[in-house]
Amino acid sequence: MEVTKGSRTFQGIIFILVLATLLSSVTAAYYYSRYTQAEAENATYAQQLRQLGAKYVSHILFDFGNGTRIWSNDTEIQPGWSLYVATEVITGGHLNATYYPEYSSHLVTAIYNKGDAGNNYWGIWTFIPTNSSWQMAVVGSDELRVNNGSVFAWTYGPNSAPP
């Protein structure tokens, strides 16, 4: 069987693609292991802080989209809490949400009985102190960890505009 220049080029391309796939898989596995290790260390640290009775202080804004705003300033939050858990505690359970196990997350549909109306929804914003601006959260409330001094906003409306 004769090997042509075209078939060698094709074999070279296949080799490079297989090598690139292998390298990207190894890199992804490395970063995933680092992520899970950091997550475990964070959970251990949060547990130690809770055992010591440590509390974080956070600030959470509820903007109802009709001019009504409620600030929950200097709220004591336990280390390791997510924004969802903090919101559940702060509102005293006045929170409607549906849990989606396939996403391991809650979809918040109402806070203090405000919600579930038409095309309106609750959006989450995080305050970035370095440039004094709000940024829409790119993950759900179950994924956002509340840290000491963190500032969050829940906004309600058709576009969930920044506070």
Image (cartoon, helix red, strand yellow):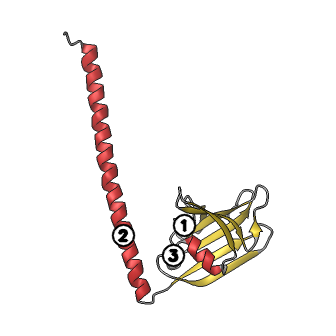
Disc sitting over residue 81 in the figure:
3
Q: Is residue 99 above or below residue 54?
A: above
First of labels 1, 2 by sequence position: 2
Point 63% across, 82% down: residue: 73
Q: Which residue type does callout 3 highlight?
A: Trp
Residue that mark 2 sits on: 40
Q: Is residue 18 above or below residue 142?
A: above
5 or 121, which lies in front? 121
Q: Determine whether, in the image, residue 55 is placed left or right of residue 133.
A: left
Badge 2, how many Cα within 10 Å: few under 14, some, many 20+? few
Point 32% across, 61% down: residue: 34
Point 63% across, 80% down: residue: 90
Element type at mark 2: helix
Q: Label 3, label 1: how many angstroms apart (C-alpha)?
A: 9 Å
Circles 1 and 2 in contact, beta carbons < 8 Å? no
Q: Is residue 11 above or below residue 92?
A: above
